[in-house]
Amino acid sequence: MRNRREEAGERERRLRWLPAALLASAFVLDLVLLNNVSTFPLLASAPVLAAPILSLRGTIATGVAANAVGLLLVELEREPTRADVTAFTSLVVLTLIAAGLNVLLTRDRQQLRTSREVAAAVQRAVLPDPPHRVGRLTVASRYEVAHAEAAIGGDLFAIHQTPHGIRMLIADVRGKGLEAIRTVNALLGSFREACLHQPDLPSVVRQLEDRMRAGIEEASGAEAESFATAVVVELTHDYSELRIAVRGHAAPLLVHDGKALPLEPAVPSLPLGLGALNSDPDGADVPVDRFELPAGATLVLYTDGINEARDTDGVFFDPVPVLSQRFPPDPEAVLDTVLSAVSRHTGSALQDDAALFAVTLDADTETNTAVPPSDTARAPRPGHGT
């Protein structure tokens, strides 16, 4: 998340001043106390503190500065003694140890950075950025990892313009790592194929369910217990109606005219891959809810890394109040607002990966007549089934 990266960079810049601040504090404290209390421990800790924060050159420079400060204090206050020789020798040894620690930490960081770059490349290859424009929709997306070391997660999103309308998917696959990536890749491929060949939304959902169950039957271990929560959306050709199938996932939000309305399903459904536990194991009945999409409205889809983000008291984040304000017709602004609010709520510490996907319907004078002038989503129409 952009704000999290900026805050992390600012914290790192502030930390770089700690060794210098420690040396200055030791110098001032020694002068104030008139050498009644030894400040050698503060001087000795400066190069050790510098090792994980500064470069090798900065760590050695901190050790040299600590020795210089100590020598200056001795020169200002008293005659050198044999005990001072031992103290300064120890300080030199600590500086050498800190330099060695810095070298080891730098090597580990480089290896981790390489691993992150490889993981990020895999993530981009599997989950490329969606197009900025699809028909009259402006599209925005974000993918935020909970930990820098875990750059491969199981969240995914996609949008395709098809002969049957614009279709969108957001999903969260159970687990992380290569097992999750395989499932993500399978779902994205199946969704792309279903968008082109399946005539309606229930058929798309059934194909995704079949793909998940086939993958589970072929897998072993943790993969055999996999499932994916998902929201599958279809926007009709005239942009007037949203058809939404929610499979155990957080309901999308419709942000419009200063309000954020959750588009809750009338009938709850199990996640993809758990259809065998349903009373309708063949998935013949896929509940689909229908809503209007006003011009200028933004549809926001997100994974549980957002709504299950907790603060220090364990309180979950609620995106509805945050999005209940007026926004420009720009999905980027909407997602930036959500991420900033999540960062404040959690103290910039996500507990789980988070994917966000938003589309804003632009006004079109030629087709506006198909979009009723409503400031909220309409209640689901009777007959939510196929």
Image (cartoon, helix red, strand yellow):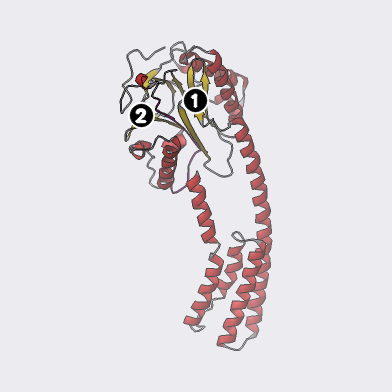
- Where is mark 1, residue-wise? 169
Q: Residue at x 54, y 78 (%)?
A: 38
Residue 262: give x, y in percent of width and height: 35, 29
Q: Is residue 116 above or below residue 91?
A: above
For mark 1, does the 10 Å Cα neighbourhood hold few (<14), some (14 to 19), or many (20 or more) residues? many
Q: Quadrant of the C terminus?
A: top left
Residue 86 lies, in percent from the top left, at 65, 78
What is the number of callouts on the image? 2
Q: Nearer the viewer, residue 372 or 34?
A: 372
Residue at 60%, 73% (x, y): give it.
Answer: 66
Marks 1/2: CA–CA distance:
17 Å
Amino acid found under the numbered disc labelled 1: Leu
**What's the residue at 51%, 56% (across, down)?**
11
- Relative placement, left or right, of 368 versus 17 is left
Relative vertical location of residue 7 with respect to residue 180 in this rendering, above or below: below
Span colored in magenta: 347-364
Residue 262 disc label = 2
Q: Is residue 200 magenta?
A: no
* Image quadrant in which you'd find residue 234: top left
Residue 284 point in image, percent of width and height: 46, 10
- Type of amino acid under label 2: Pro
Q: Nearer the viewer, residue 147 or 372?
A: 372
